[in-house]
């Protein structure tokens, strides 16, 4: 079996992982493992922008307050202020790397999104994530100390305690190299999980196919706590079209005056919230869900056609072009939209340095719970969280050298065979995503959650038998992770006896008097 040694292992090639690698590479031998190509993560799909106080009329206090309001009482004030106050330097760092942010009259153009009290969204037209990720990938590939290993899928973390070693810490990981079909052992004093979220646990999602909760599931198996997994943000406006499964219509469309309409042209947000289309995402998503169910609709409509065509094309060139390819001219007609699973607000429990419960293991980006997002993420706070905690984790690693890992045993693959029934994996994957959508979606009940829990328990037994008998594949590993994440979401939802933020229960419609995070421990 192949064994490879590095100073730092980073799992994931989104904004968090790439940023951490660049901060570490001056003195550390860094490996970035990504299960597909380096550009296939969620970061490249972010259309809105990056929230940062960059205008004299804005303030850190206002950004903090907006985040705490959106977080519905569960955002950690210290984590929130930490991110907000470090956001401007993160924008400056990206500018130094060459990210071509949109400008107006020689200054950064700032747009506004739902839940923000000021214009503070730095962006690259309507494709910010792609522009940032392309710039960082180019910089990473130019950096000699960084090795990018594509098509390497995380199997499990290597934990000293499970090998009978002391002290307990993370020693590295096992990864499936899909190019050779070999499980490779990677050793390092430090490992960073930057694997993104878990949107693929739901039938409808804005996330790419890579968003299968790999880091959350691996950290849970390794003994780490997870927090607030019940808070899954559903983006209100995913394009509804038979030939497109997850094209996001940016929050900024509503920020620049887009109106949500019923098919007859009636504007319905005035019936739901005084902030209208600029209400936080959970409010807007529930409003759309309510109207769709009330009127028996497949979708609602988002209309920006009252703005001048030149304005629409200049501000939303990618959305305009993609919709036009599908026969929708957004300068003249509304866009059909539906809510879809978008962002995992909970995750691996971490501190302000990105440290998890397992020494030697950090988690950053969407896979981590930092306390920033609380019960609902404020628009465009995610990319800045990636950068702030990437720098914080890198700083902590550089200041906390650890001894090289001892010898570790290779993963025993000698008693397994190749699977002869791949249909079992695809059927279980489809079943899981459908009942999670039906039972653990935007509106929840005790009965629905109980049904989901029973189905998850059955699938776990079947998948465990399959995992123990057959050679691992990426599909099997992802399914195993998704079932684990589904269990964590349902357990967290069952333990929250109130409606708060993204978790809305018909059985517990009231807000509890004290806001408490949901912390699950595998111990």
Image (tube, rainbow, N blue to C red):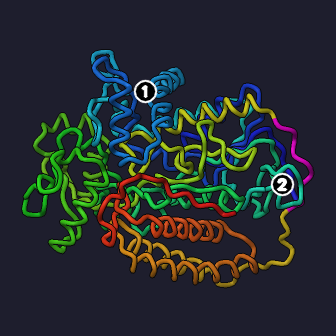
Identify the residue shown where x is 45% and y is 66%. 493
Give the residue drawn at x 48%, y 67%.
495
The label on residue 160 is 2
Residue range of the region highlighted in magenta in the rendering: 402-410
Q: Which residue is mark 1?
A: 100
Q: Secondary structure at mark 2?
A: helix
- C-alpha gap between disc 1 and disc 2: 44 Å
Relative image position of residue 220 (x, y in whole percent): 65, 60
Q: In the picture provided, is 135 more to the left or to the right than 73? A: right
Does 112 lie within the magenta span?
no
Quadrant where the C terminus sits is: bottom right
Asked which quadrant contains residue 468, the reply is: bottom right
Q: Main secondary structure of the magenta part?
A: loop
Q: Quadrant of residue 484?
A: bottom right
Vertically, is 481 above or below 187? below
How many residues crowd mark 2 within 10 Å: few (<14), some (14–19), many (20+)?
many
x%, y% of residue 397? 72, 34
Tell me which numbered mark, 1 or 2, is placed earlier along the sequence: 1
């Amino acid at each position: 079996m192949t064994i490879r040694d590095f100073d730092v292992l980073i799992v994931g090639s989104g904004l968090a992982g790439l940023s951490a690698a660049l901060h570490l590479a001056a003195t550390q031998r860094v490996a970035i493992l990504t299960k597909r190509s380096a550009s296939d993560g969620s970061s490249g799909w972010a259309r809105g922008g990056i929230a940062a106080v960059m205008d004299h009329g804005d303030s850190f206090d206002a950004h903090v307050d907006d985040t705490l309001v959106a977080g519905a009482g569960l955002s950690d004030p210290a984590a929130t202020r930490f991110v907000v106050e470090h956001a401007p330097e993160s924008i400056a760092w990206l500018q130094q790397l060459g990210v071509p942010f949109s400008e107006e009259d020689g200054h950064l153009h700032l747009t506004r999104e739902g839940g923000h009290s000021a214009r503070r969204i730095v962006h690259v037209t309507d494709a910010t994530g792609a522009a940032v990720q392309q710039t960082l990938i180019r910089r990473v590939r130019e950096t000699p100390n960084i090795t990018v290993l594509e098509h390497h899928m995380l199997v499990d973390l290597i934990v000293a305690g499970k090998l009978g070693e002391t002290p307990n810490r993370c020693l590295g990981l096992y990864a499936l190299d899909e190019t050779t079909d070999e499980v490779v052992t990677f050793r390092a004093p430090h490992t960073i999980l930057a694997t993104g979220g878990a949107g693929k646990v739901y039938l409808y999602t804005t996330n790419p196919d890579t968003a299968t909760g790999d880091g959350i599931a691996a950290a849970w198996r390794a003994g780490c706590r997870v927090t607030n997994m019940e808070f899954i943000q559903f983006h209100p406006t995913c394009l509804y079209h038979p030939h497109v499964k997850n094209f996001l219509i940016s929050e900024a469309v509503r920020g620049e005056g887009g109106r949500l309409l019923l098919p007859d042209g009636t504007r319905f947000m005035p019936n739901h919230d005084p902030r209208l289309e600029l209400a936080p995402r959970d409010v807007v998503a529930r409003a759309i869900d309510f109207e769709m169910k009330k009127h028996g609709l497949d979708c609602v409509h988002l209309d920006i056609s009252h703005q001048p065509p030149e304005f629409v094309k200049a501000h939303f060139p990618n959305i305009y072009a993609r919709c036009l390819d599908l026969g929708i001219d957004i300068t003249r007609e509304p866009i059909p939209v539906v809510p879809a699973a978008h962002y995992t607000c909970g995750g691996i429990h971490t501190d302000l340095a990105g440290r998890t419960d397992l020494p030697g293991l950090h988690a950053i980006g969407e896979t981590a719970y930092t306390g920033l997002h609380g019960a609902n993420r404020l628009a465009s706070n995610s990319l800045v969280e990636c950068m702030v905690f990437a720098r914080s984790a890198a700083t902590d690693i550089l200041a906390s050298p650890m001894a090289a890992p001892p010898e570790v045993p290779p993963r025993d693959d000698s008693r397994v065979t190749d699977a002869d029934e791949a249909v079992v994996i695809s059927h279980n994957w489809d079943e899981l995503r459908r009942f999670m959508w039906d039972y653990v979606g935007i509106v929840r009940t005790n009965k629905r959650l109980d049904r989901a829990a029973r189905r998850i328990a059955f699938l776990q037994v079947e998948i465990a038998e399959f995992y123990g008998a057959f050679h691992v594949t990426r599909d099997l590993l992802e399914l195993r992770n998704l079932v684990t994440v589904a269990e964590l979401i349902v357990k967290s939802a069952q333990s929250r006896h109130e409606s708060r933020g993204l978790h809305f229960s018909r059985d517990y419609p009231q807000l509890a008097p004290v806001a408490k995070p949901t912390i699950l421990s595998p111990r």
